[in-house]
Amino acid sequence: MDFHIAGFTYYEGIDVIDELSLGVSVDLFAESDNPYDPESIAIYYKNKKIGYVPKDKNSLISKYLYFGHNEIFESKIQYVNKEEHPERQIRVVLKIKDNR
């Protein structure tokens, strides 16, 4: 799955945008106490919140994270274009790890 980071302009993304490049890892955390979306998933880079997984893509991922299965996911920066609209500058790819 891949997606643009929702809310990028409202969090600390602008503070770390120069560090976000192709292949850089980001972390996902479920925010079940979020008043706007109990299935929300925050995206962090080095302990800085840079936005969210878009609402239309977070439901299944949220369930796995809620039950503590963070280790099955690998999330990395897939696309960076600082010339785009701020909400479309960064794209993340999310994969399920193959631990065979």
Image (cartoon, rainbow, N blue to C red):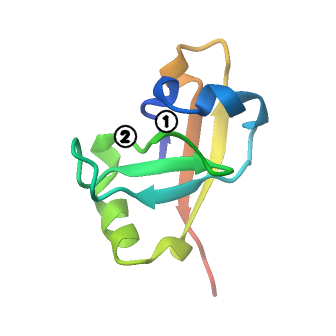
Q: Identify the residue at horizontal 72%, vertical 37% (top origin).
A: 20
Which residue is identified by label 1? 5
Sequence-earlier tag: 2 or 1: 1
| Occupied quadrant, residue 86 | top right
Q: Is residue 100 left or right of residue 50?
A: right
| Quadrant placement of the C terminus | bottom right
Measuring from the top left, give residue 26's x and y in whole percent.
62, 52
Q: Identify the residue at horizontal 59%, vertical 72% (top origin).
A: 97
Q: Identify the residue at horizontal 58%, vertical 56% (top origin).
A: 27
- At mark 1, the secondary structure is loop
Measuring from the top left, give residue 59's x and y in whole percent.
28, 56
**In the image, residue 30 above or below residue 16:** below
Residue 33 numbered mark, or none: none
Q: Is residue 10 left or right of residue 81?
A: left
Q: Identify the residue at horizontal 58%, vertical 33% (top origin).
A: 12
Residue sitting farthest toward the bottom: 100
Measuring from the top left, give residue 90's x and y in whole percent.
59, 31
Kindly report the distance in space between the C-alpha atoms of the residues bearing marks 2 and 1. 7 Å
Q: Residues within 10 Å of mark 2 (few under 14, many from 20)?
A: some
**In the image, residue 44 above or below residue 30:** above
Measuring from the top left, give residue 18's x and y in whole percent.
77, 29
- Inspect the image, locate mark 2, and give the three-letter code of the amino acid beneath it: Pro
Q: Say how many tags the image has.
A: 2
- At mark 2, the secondary structure is loop
Residue 54 numbered mark, or none: 2
For the residues bearing labels 2 and 1, Cβ distance under 8 angstroms:
no
Q: Residues within 10 Å of mark 1 (few under 14, many from 20)?
A: many
Which of the pair 96/18 is nearer the observer?
A: 18
- Inspect the image, locate mark 1, and give the three-letter code of the amino acid beneath it: Ile
